[in-house]
Amino acid sequence: MTGQFLRKMGAVSAAAMALAPALATAQEGAAGHPVPGQYHLQPSVTPIMDSIVAFHDGVLMWSISFIVILVLGLLVWIMVRYNAKRNPVPAAFTHNTMVEIIWTVLPIVALIIIAIPSFGVLSDQLTTPDGERKYLGSNIFSFGEVEVPAPELTIKAIGQQWYWDYEYVDQGVDLSQIMLNEEDRTSLKPNQPRLLAVDNELVVPVDTTVRMQITADPTGVIHAFAVPSFGIKIDAVPGRLNETWFNARETGIYYGQCSELCGKDHAFMPIAVRVVTKDEFAVFMKAFEEDGDYETANSTLAAVQ
Ligand SMILES: [Cu+2]
């Protein structure tokens, strides 16, 4: 009876897991921000996020589901078979060497299997491409097969209390990015998400590796720079320069939020990265460098609505 129950539970969970990616795909195609009813990760547009999605869907969900079902099965089995009514005279032994070896070794093996791709993805996130190193992409058990060009653009993000400043380091131009309040959002950018829409989007070119340097105001507090669709999350620490990178393959606006509890307006310092075509970016940057003014440069792009 127990065996059949376990088999049925297995079939149900296998069906649910087979369905989950299909449901997740149906939700994709949405912009780079959360949507109502969403439960899966935000759609990936970078090699790093491909790795994270593969790690979540391919390793973590399976191991978590297996462990939950196994433990649940054991609990049910014990409750049914070894309750006081069915088993009035309990066994008197206290040790079983084989069982103890198994329940020590199996979790170690599971952790090693999880650790291998986990460390691989971590090292991908923190190693800025040099054009030669290969990245895991969605095949997290490979030794790296995705080619990523060396960075062509360096951007420094500075966490302020409570908004973000950005510098295009080599171009010597900068901008501040401040969340729009509801009144401004509904009149200026009604199609952008509430609490995420900003006055000035950070503009970057598509299919280009961008080196992100992250820090915070030296007299300020710790923030964290995170953009889910890019698979980026890194601390912004006063007096320290952290580095990560992304290479977005689709144009659009990708939103993120400060991800370190930083103070009273922690929830109101969103991050908005606008990925445009390389031609659009060239025009944008030319205007920005000539004028030093974000407004002028931004007016070369289609208005964000
Ligand atoms: Cu913050």
Image: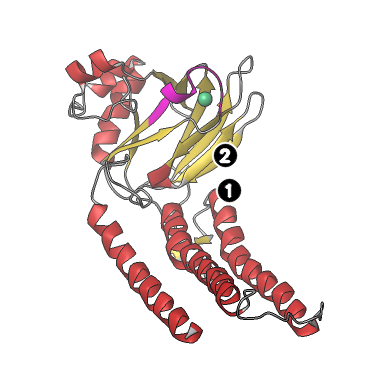
Tell me if residue 160 comes above or below residue 26 in the rendering: above
Q: Quadrant of residue 228?
A: top left
Q: Quadrant of residue 179?
A: top left
Evaluate if marks 1 and 2 touch, with contact meaning CB atoms under 8 Å apart: yes
Q: Secondary structure at mark 1?
A: helix
Which sits earlier in the primary sequence, circle 1 or circle 2? 1
The vertical placement of 286 against 48, above or below, is above
- Assess whether residue 277 is covered by the magenta stretch: no
Q: Is residue 266 magenta?
A: yes
Q: Amino acid at mark 2?
A: Glu
Label 2 sits on residue: 243
Q: Residue at left 55%, top 55%?
A: 124
Relative placement, left or right, of 276 versus 12 is: left
Residue at image point 36% right, 52% down: 40
Q: Is residue 149 visible?
A: yes
Q: How is the image coloured?
A: secondary structure
User: What percent of the width, then of the height, locates residue 266?
Assistant: 49, 23
The residues bearing labels 1 and 2 have C-alpha atoms spaced at a distance of 7 Å
Pointer 1 residue Cβ closer than 8 Å to ligand 1: no
Task: Please tell me whether residue 295 is drawn above or below residue 215 in the rendered image.
Answer: above
Name the amino acid type tagged 1.
Leu
Under 8 Å from ligand 1: the CB of mark 2?
A: no
Residue under label 1: 126
User: Within 10 Å of the Cα at label 1, are there few (<14), some (14-19), or many (20+) other Cα atoms?
Assistant: some
In front: 112, or 92? Answer: 92
Q: Position of residue 9 (x, y in %)?
A: 42, 75
Q: Which residues are magenta?
A: 261-271
Where is the C terminus found, in terms of image quarters?
top left
Q: Is residue 144 visible?
A: no
Q: In x, y percent, where is residue 122?
A: 58, 53
Secondary structure category for the residue under label 2: strand
- For image coordinates 38% across by 18% down, the residue present is 178
